[in-house]
Image (spheres, helix red, strand yellow):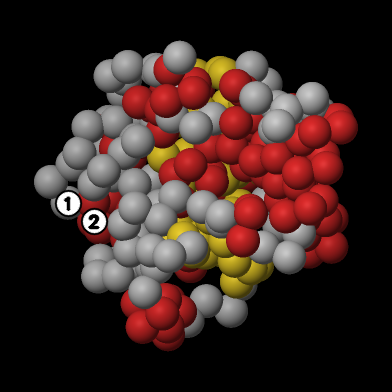
Amino acid sequence: QHVAEHRLAILGDPQSVAAQQYSMLALKIQQWMARTGGKTLLVTSSSGEEGKSLTALNLGLALAAASEARVLLVDADLRLPQVGQRLGLGTKRGLSDLLAPEGGDMNSYISKIGSLHVLPGGPCPANPVGLLASGRAREILAGMRNDFDLVILDSPPIVPIADSHILAGLCDGVVLVVRARKTRPELLLRAMESLGASNMVGFVLNDVELSATPYAYAYRYYQRHYLGRS
């Protein structure tokens, strides 16, 4: 029930159309890694409620399930962390604690969901920008690069705060999540202009009404003949 409520398709319904789409996204990210050697990927959006955390979670789960690679999902949204709650990890220490000068060893903060390693956000700090811009943050990210094959960071929206701008400069690639019927074009343009990321990997269109797309027949055929669903 918890998995269904939080729309974790990869865990709850791995044969669904949604899960298959996340698996295809995971394949594209693997191809990007092989082509560029990238190991750190930032997932963000222009504003709130566009599905960036949902995308980061399902992408991380899909990547961890599809290969033997060690994948780490980091909740880097220190202002409104959601990863731990969506995965049912409860209240745990996380990235904000780790970034503190006395944070200690990274491995003590990491949980494992199946084959996916997860670093929750932790309690909301007084100065998120200061923590993310610190030398310790760069050292920790370098350690993550050494210990894992791919690190996915779920970050705050781009407009109007600086957190994602800092994180984008520390990562090899950026994926921008756009929600159908929700994301305003002017906000998306503003986000792209302000981020100015030369390492943009691409966009993820979220919450698409499949029946309204040119591919509706293909989706219905898959559901009816492969899944036995109407």
What residue is disc 2 on?
130
Q: Residue furthest front?
A: 230
**Relative height, residue 1 to residue 46 (above, below):** above
Name the foreground residue: 148 vs 57.
57
Using the image, determine if residue 20 lies above or below residue 230.
Answer: below
Left or right, 64 with respect to 35, comes to left
Can you see residue 143? Answer: no
Label 1 residue SS: loop
Task: Please state which amino acid type lies under the numbered disc 1.
Answer: Asn
Q: Secondary structure at mark 2?
A: helix
Image coordinates of residue 62 in percent, x first then y, are 69, 35
Residue 164, relative to residue 62: is it above or below? below
Give the answer, above or below, for where 105 lies relative to 210.
Answer: above
- Which residue is rendered at x = 45% and y = 14% of the image? 1
Residue denoted by label 1: 127
Can residue 169 be seen in this snapshot?
yes
- Residue at the left extreme, as displayed: 126
Q: Is residue 2 left or right of residue 123?
A: right
Residue sitting at x 79%, y 27%: 227
Q: Position of residue 225 (x, y in %)?
A: 87, 32
Q: Residue at x 56, y 56 (%)?
A: 208
Residue in the picture at 77% in, 35% down? 223
Residue 79, which numbered label? none
Label 2 with label 1: CB-CB less than 8 Å: yes
Say which amino acid is labelled 2. Gly
- Label 2 Cα neighbours within 10 Å, binned few <14 / some 14-19 / many ≥20: few
User: How far separated are the C-alphas under marks 2 and 1?
Assistant: 5 Å
